[in-house]
Image: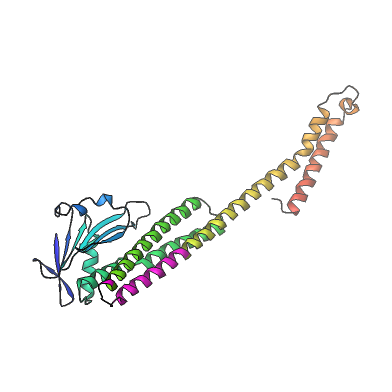
Amino acid sequence: MKNYALSDGIISLTQTSNISSILISNTNEYQSIDKMVNLEKINFTKLEISEKGYYFAFAIPSRNDFVNREIKVSCIFEDTKIIFIDETNFIEQKVEKMMASKKVYKSLFLFMVGFLVELISEEFEYLETFEKRLAVIEEEALNEVLENAQKKIISIRKKLIEIGDYYEQLEDIALKLKDNNIAIKNPNTQHIDFFIEKLKRLNNHCDSIREYGNQVRELYQTQVDIRLNKVMKLLTAITTICLPLTIVSSWYGMNFINMPEIKWEYGYFVVIPVTVIVIIVLFVIFKKNKYF
């Protein structure tokens, strides 16, 4: 359990509960609040407002593509204290970063808004990683390196949808905070407006990357179709080249008694070169027309 104090707008680590305090705990250390005990019940990011204060639930998407588990955090914000319940050290890292920045937060409410801004402080850089990965897949598709490309694209799209939902949930929280802030006759909403504007830009950027992902997927499908067409063209050419052999074998396989070539002593030696010549001519024609 860690205690932080907000003194003269500056965050500092403390051992005692001050007038404006920020507490980071886990479920075992803070069992007295039933609503916050079971973090596993948190399925999405939301805000509930009551007479006692604000209740936040955060379901933050994991940064690991191969781990679907979210970082789940609860928070209660009352008049003089903010209590975070976190089983990881995620919140502690964020608060420590805010403390290191030496920014001034004139109230716990502004600290909470600052914390929300901190949650998305590195999101543009994170989204850029998806754009770069899609660019690599696009380059590989153009070079006909198609192994696992479809799987990679689907994985990226699923993650971007999850992140986009998270941004929308954060925006819903921000709008509720703004409405409540106006309702209590506090016109100072510029920090919330900044947060909302940044979320909108993140959402737009996320949508543009998802659209880019769709384009890469279409390019991948086009390359697969081109490869399939090449295979079909090659098979068609081979079948056509071998067709004279099939015709000859079928024709002379009828074994009619009055077929003169059957008893001709040079028939075998004539059929072979004629067949080979036809195959060579067809091969040259197909090669010249770039069928393979």
The extreme top residue here reads 257
Residue shown at 38%/54% (left/top)? 65
Q: Position of residue 184 (x, y in %)?
A: 25, 72
Please give left or right for residue 217 compared with residue 186 in the image: right
Quadrant in which the N terminus is drawn = bottom left
Viewer-side residue, 81 vs 270: 81
Viewer-side residue, 278 vs 208: 208
- Specify whether residue 195 is painted magenta: yes
Res 168 → quadrant:
bottom left
Viewer-side residue, 10 vs 183: 183
- Specify whether residue 99 is painted magenta: no
Above or below, 21 relative to 255 = below
Res 241 → quadrant:
top right
Is residue 143 visible to the viewer in this orientation of the structure?
A: no
Region in magenta: 183-207
Q: Position of residue 286 (x, y in %)?
A: 75, 50
